[in-house]
């Protein structure tokens, strides 16, 4: 899909107090190891095999907490709607998945990936997501850029896992409270943190398959 804009951003949009409240709330919850792809069905680190843990460590190292509190959605969803219209995507979506509060500590990272899959969700017991796909992804920077080094958020506007691998640093996400919205099929990564801790919040927004 050819796009004029591959992402849309709002620098320092979320007030610092709200960012701090999300961080405090996230740190008060029980965190878990961040998983990828099909491993997310297992939900818990203890259920992974030794090989799965080894393979995962090559792709992603971070800790997460799931959140679905309405006050968080109220802060972020307006920016999704504005970006969707302003960028000219105009994707139809009607549901936001649980937010993922992510903590990137020293040497933690998330290698190249895209958030969407090649098939819609198959979750008959969940009418909010069953038959739908991820259309719009959102990343919110909760940390001040002086609180960590490394951890660059990068895009690569390729079409597959064997694509161009020509990263573009998304500098707009660095300031605290910045919001970046992008189609869920756009490839991106978080480079290793070299000092400090990077906190972020990620949200995926669903709709029926493209027609």
Image (cartoon, helix red, strand yellow):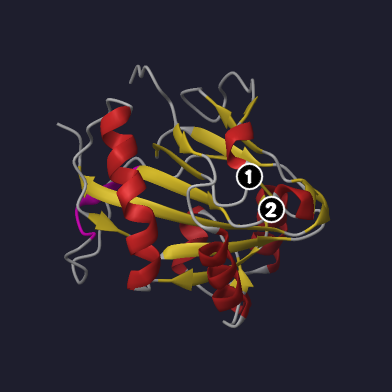
**Residue span colored magenta:** 129-135
Q: Position of residue 191 (x, y in %)?
A: 72, 42
Query: How many angstroms separate mark 2 from mark 1 (CA)?
Result: 6 Å
Q: Are marks 2 and 1 in contact (CB under 8 Å)?
A: yes
Q: Residue at x 51, y 57 (%)?
A: 15
Q: Is residue 64 visible?
A: yes
Is 93 magenta? The answer is no
- Rendered image: mark on residue 64: none
Quadrant of the rendering where the C terminus is positioned: top left
Q: Residue at x 20, y 72 (%)?
A: 125
Residue position for label 2: 144
Q: Residue at x 30, y 39 (%)?
A: 82
Q: Position of residue 118 (x, y in %)?
A: 34, 40
Q: Position of residue 23 (x, y in %)?
A: 60, 69
N-terminal-most mark, 2 or 1:
2
Q: Secondary structure at mark 1?
A: loop
Residue position for label 1: 175
């Amino acid at each position: 899909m050819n796009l004029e804009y591959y992402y849309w951003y709002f620098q320092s949009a979320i007030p610092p107090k709200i960012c701090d409240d999300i961080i405090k709330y996230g740190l008060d919850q029980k965190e878990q190891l961040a998983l990828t792809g099909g491993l997310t069905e297992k939900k818990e680190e203890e259920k992974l095999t030794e090989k799965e843990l080894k393979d995962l460590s090559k792709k992603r190292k971070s800790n997460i907490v799931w959140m679905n509190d309405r006050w968080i959605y109220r802060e972020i969803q307006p920016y999704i709607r504005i970006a969707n219209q302003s960028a000219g995507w105009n994707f139809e979506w009607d549901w936001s998945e649980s937010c993922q509060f992510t903590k990137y500590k020293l040497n933690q990272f998330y290698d190249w990936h895209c958030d969407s899959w090649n098939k819609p969700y198959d979750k008959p017991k969940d009418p909010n997501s069953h038959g739908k796909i991820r259309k719009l992804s959102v990343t919110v920077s909760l940390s001040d850029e002086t609180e960590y080094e490394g951890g660059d958020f990068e895009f690569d506007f390729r079409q597959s896992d064997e694509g161009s691998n020509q990263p573009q640093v998304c500098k707009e996400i660095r300031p605290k409270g910045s919001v970046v919205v992008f189609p869920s099929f756009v490839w991106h990564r978080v480079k290793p943190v070299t000092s400090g801790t990077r906190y972020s919040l990620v949200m995926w927004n669903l709709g029926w398959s493209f027609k």
